[in-house]
Structures are given as C-alpha cells and as structure tokens.
Amino acid sequence: MSVSTQRRVVVSGMGCVSPLGVGCDATLAALQDARDCVTPVTEFDVSRCRSTTAGQVSDLSRAGVINARAGRWSRAAQMLLIATHEALGQGGSFSPEIAVIGTTSGGMPLGEAFYRASERGSHAPRRWVRDYVPQQPALDALRTLGIDAPLRVLSNACATGTNAVGNAFHLVRSGRVRRALCGGYDALCELVFAGFASLQASTGEKCRPFDAGRSGLVLGEGAAVFLLETAEDAEAAGRPILAEIAGYGAANDNHHLTQPNPDGSGPRMSMERALRDAGMVSDGIDYVNAHGTATPFNDACEARAIMDVCPEATVSSTKGQMGHSLGAAGAIEAAFCILGIRNALAPANLHFRSADDGVALDIVANAPRPLRIRAALSNSLGFGGSNASLVIREVAP
Amino acid sequence: MTPRIQGMGWVTPFGRDFETAWDAVKLGRTADPRLVKHPFTSREWPVLSASPDALADVARIARIRRASTISHLAMAAAMDAIRRAGCDPASENVAVVFAATNGGVIYTRRFYADVSTSGVHAGSPLLFPETVYNAPVSHIAAQLGVNGVVTTIVNDATAGIDAFAVATELLESNACDRCLVVGAEEFDWVVGEACESWSLVTRGETITPFRGGGTIFAEGAAAVLLGREGGPAVSTVVPPRSFRSFEEGADLASSLPASKIVISSASGTKFDAVEQGVGNRQLTPKAAFGEVFATSSIQAVVCAALALADDQEAPDALVLSTGFSAQFAALRLTR
C-alpha cells in the first residue's frame, strides 16, 4: 500500500499528566511559561545521592477522578487513569479495539513495598503483588473507565512511550483496527532513581539538555494517552481532530546496553524511517522534540543525528522542565508536540547556555518560541539500543 | 499473508532437545524440581529448571557473560531457532519480539536488596542495566546483528500469544522478512513469595492440571522464527482479553472453533477453570515444564507444531493461554 493511499490517522483525544500539570490545559500553561517543574524528591530518602531532585506530579486528587478504590492504587495507575479519563472525555464515546500502553517499571513502588515486607518475613497485602506488575495499572484504568479492549503492554526502556503510539498508529493505518487507545506511563520510584544514580547518569545540578556543560539527567514521572482513529471516523463521530500521526520509525543500534552508539546511527535510522513512513523529506519538519536527556552520551549522539537528518529544524528537549519520565516520556513529548502544533509554540529547552563544539542546532534556548509547526518529529532513545521517532503533523482546519 | 514457522528452539527442564521434552508432555511427566528457599523465613518452593550444562555454550558469549539467567535462556532458544531455520539475521531483515512476565527478576531483586539495605545511593551499576525488561532482547539483537524492529511485550502469560500478533503485523506490513518470537523467564524467591498469597503454588512435586493443588514455577525459554513460507501457519491470533470472572473467561475460551489438538495452559491453579471445557482432550505442557508465564505460551506453540507433526490428520491445533491477571488469549496453527 503506498503512502498516498493509506488511511490518515488522527489524534481525536488526548490526556496528559506530568510535573507540568494535571491535564492538557495546565500542561500548555506551563509550557508557555517555560516553568521549571523539577523539585526536591520527597517520596524517599535521597540525601546521600548526587541527584536529589526530580519532576514530580502533585495534586492527583484535584483531577476529581481518583475515587476511594483508585486511591489505593499505585501512583502510576492513578496517573494513567487520569490521563485516560481526560482523553476519553474530549470527544464523546470512543470504543477502542486495542489499547497499547508503554511503561518501564509498572507499579514498582508497590513492588518495592512488597519486597521490604518480604525481607522482614511478613506477608504483604495481596493487592501489592497484583498491582505492581506492568499490565495492572493499565487493566485497572481501562476497566474503571469501562473499556474492554485487548491490552498490549510494550516495554522498550525509555523509547517505550513512542513505541506504543507508533504501534497503535500502524494498527489503525493498516486497517487492522479502527480505533486505538495508546500512550505511556511511569511513576518515580526508588529502584529506578537508585539505578540512574548507580550509573552516575543523574545530576545534582540543573538538567541542561544539549548544553556543553551538561552533567546528567533528572528523573520525572507522568502519563499521556491518545485516541487514534482515521480522519474520516473522527469526523463522522464528531470528535475533534487534534493532529495527525503521519509516520513512525524504530531502530536498534546494537551498541551497548546503556549507551547509544556515539556515531548517532540509532536515532538517525529511526528518524529516517519515520520520515520515510510519513512520505516526507526532512525539510518538512519544523520542530524536533529531542530525547535530550542531558547526559553527555545521549545528547552528543542525538545532536549528530539531528544535524544529519533535520539540520534546519528548530530543536528543544523538554526534559529540562520536567525531567525524564522514562516509559511515559515519548507519549508526554508527543503531547507537547501536539500542543505546540495547535498553539504555534516551540517549547523551551531550559538551562541552556552554549552548545558542544561542532554542534549547530537551532535550540529553543530557555524560553518558548512562537513558531508555526506544520510537522514535528519526536525522538525517544532507550537502554538496549532502542530508538523510536514519530512524525506528527498539523491538520488544516 | 499468513506467517509460517521456519525454526523453533526451547529450553525446558529437560534441556534443549525436542524429543525428550515432547515425550514428557505427551506422558504428562513433571520434571524433577529443585527447592528454592526464602532467605529470611522457612518458606521454600519447588522450581523446575534446566541444568546449567544446557546453557554452557551461551554462557561463553562475551556480551552476556555477566547477564542474568533470563538472558542466557533467551539467547539459547533464539540461537537454536535461528540455526534450525538456516537463517543469517545479520544479512537479512529480521525483527525480534520478546515476551516476558517477570523479566530479570533476579538482578532486580538483588539490586533493590542493596538499595533497601544500604540506601538509594548504594545500587550496583552492574546489576541495574539488566533489570530492564528489554535487556534480554537487546542482547539477542546485538548477538545476531539485528538492527530492525526489536521490541518487548510485557504482560501475564498472554504476552506470549500477543508476541505472535505483533510478529504477524510486522510481517504483513513488510517491516521485516522474518520475525523471531522469543520468551524467557527466570525464577527468584521473590516470585514465589509474590504468588504465595494467591494460593497458586503446590508443595508437591507434580502438577495435576484441572485438579487443583497448585502449580510449580519454572525457568525456561522458547523461540519461534516466523516467515512467509515454511511449516505450520499462525492462522489466527486472539489477543489478550480481560475477564471479570472465570465464567466470563470460560465463555471466551469456549467461543473458539473446535480443534482436534488443544494445547492448554492449565497448570493446577484455579485459573484452569477458564479452559476446562475446551475440546475433548487437551495436552498440558505445564504439567511437564512448570509455569513459565509468558514463555509457557510460546512453549505451547512449539508443542502445537510438534503435535501437528505427530498427527498428520489433524488440520490445525489450538493454543490457549490464561494469565494470572485474568486475561485470555489464543492462537491457532494450521498446516
């Protein structure tokens, strides 16, 4: 099937929970203000760590979705529920034929609590075991909202959120399903915080993506959920068309379990594949939302790839505002792209001073930039050599 | 386009060859368990595992020398499937889809034990990278030279079936020319402890499907290489559907068209009720190999292919999978 004859897949609902805010409106306001939402970690003791901050979601109860039952779930499940509820609330009745959700650590805070109880030889509550596995937050959120669709859970480290949206996009475009719900979620947890600390990948300073003096990432958390269907189906149902998902590419660089190939081949391949999938050339991309974790290795590798593939595009990493939300990152950043497209706004790359020698990218330094974004490219890179890219386009009114 | 099986591999408590393990399935003979003890209490669990000798060749691979057991198991099954198919992944467009339920639980528990004991600053950088769910498939992709689609699906046992749905999608869309579906699981006491409170585990040394008493957890792996031509075809995949009661699950299972060969996921737990009424006679590989979660579903597909080879009159074989998160999935192999 040629690109021109394939179905156009659109986003007809979107929900977002992140340190920037609960809901798309609050998220947009924080993007417009270039708000730094990274704060001291309060969930567990980090006093002996190099990094002591993270992007943390607050005020989950304010969304009005967390009832007494959901109040006992993990924070991960609660964030996913709120994001799913918001997405479904935007466009009337939507019955997905599949749900594709990405995560790296599921309801791990409950797993941690379970382990600590086991270590003491005491029996942990049964629900901790039930709820910490990666599928359970998604099953709980979907069941609570009356969705009975088959569930697919992807876990490709930090590329997962993008993989989930990309997989759902392909399912709708190919006609295998008509409607898909997709997204990603992850909550801050002790195990992952300790993990990045152990690798000395997290910083005690500000997260400075693409800055020559960058010293590492800060972690974050959140969830984002999208409703995907064809433009014709969305129009027929009277649902809003927020943007078009036009292309998706994934690639594996086979270099190292935790480090990208410095030649940039991983993200270069995923971007090229996403553009080819969209039937586009690189000069059609106005904005790149980079993975941009602010680790020395990631940003050098990704900058090289962006310069090769989209040298003219405006670029920012939004992780300076909210940290790295792992399995949620790709989905949240796709939401940022859609908000940017709809509001003619390139989000800020916070804490940027100067680029590496030889890096010539048009970075949106420290403040958002008014920009008409006809098409955006969103990158995600993960452990295991996982790379994924999405092409998201504006839809003419 | 219907994907067809081109090569298979597995690691069961009986080793890596097909004959001994397949005979055990047909006889319903449970492998000999070892005991894994809870380090802080008197609790212990029987576990079925392959002998370390069965993984000696993969343990020498430099990239996974220090990786956890799950990566060794996955690599062994993957390499066997590739070799039997005569495939050279480095020169072909091969995708890899990995399915897991618990993932790298040994290193995850060890890593968190250090954190729990000594603080968030005290985790080991050697252990953490192996805790991510996609660590095993990244090792496989690197070893085989795959740079196309490499993805990991996580769910209860139904993930093993959903992996075939993903593989079918990739082959149909020409995203790859062949797709390797792999599953692997390792066992740690923390898994036994987790399932203890759900009354899923037997204290005995055998598994009696459909008669209760509990299951025995196991380590193992399976791999199936799919392409556009070859052996039995994956003609239908029923993706994971959740059910609210065993009756609802049984309705899902019994709604499937009948088949002479039914490979059931029953393993002596209350979840067996979902598959009780499907077909006249069922093969139950878990009675031989134990509960290997998502990997069990891929081992069951291997069993279905072997059953079709044994019974030349059967037109198809139905593989059932019921997961502990109350989801049901199924797959049909045809000639």
Image (cartoon, grey):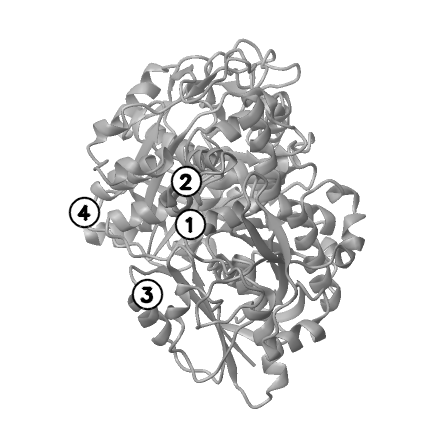
Labels 1 and 2 within one chain:
no
- For the residue marked with disc 1, what is the amino acid? Ser
Marks 4 and 3: which is nearer the front? 3
Q: Is residue B255 above or below residue A151?
A: below
Provide the residue designation for mark 2.
A124
Neighbourhood count class around disc 3 (C-alpha, 10 Å): few under 14, some 14–19, many 20 upward: some
Which of these two is toward me, A69 or A213? A69
CA gap, disc 1 and disc 4: 41 Å
Q: Which corner quadrant of the image does residue B35 belong to? A: bottom right
CA gap, disc 4 and disc 3: 32 Å
- For the residue marked with disc 2, what is the amino acid? Ala
- For the residue marked with disc 4, what is the amino acid? Gly
Q: Which residue is at a point 48% across and 85% down the rendered structure image?
A: B260
Chain bearing mark 3: B
Q: Earlier in the sequence, mark 1 or mark 3?
A: 1
Marks 1/2 in contact by CB < 8 Å: the verdict is yes
Labels 2 and 4 within one chain:
yes
In the rendered image, residue B204, in percent from the top left (x then y), is placed at 55, 63
Provide the residue designation for mark 3.
B246
Q: Which corner quadrant of the image does residue B96 belong to? A: bottom right
Q: Is residue B9 left or right of residue A93?
A: right
Marks 1/3 in contact by CB < 8 Å: the verdict is no
Which of these two is toward me, A70 or A150? A70
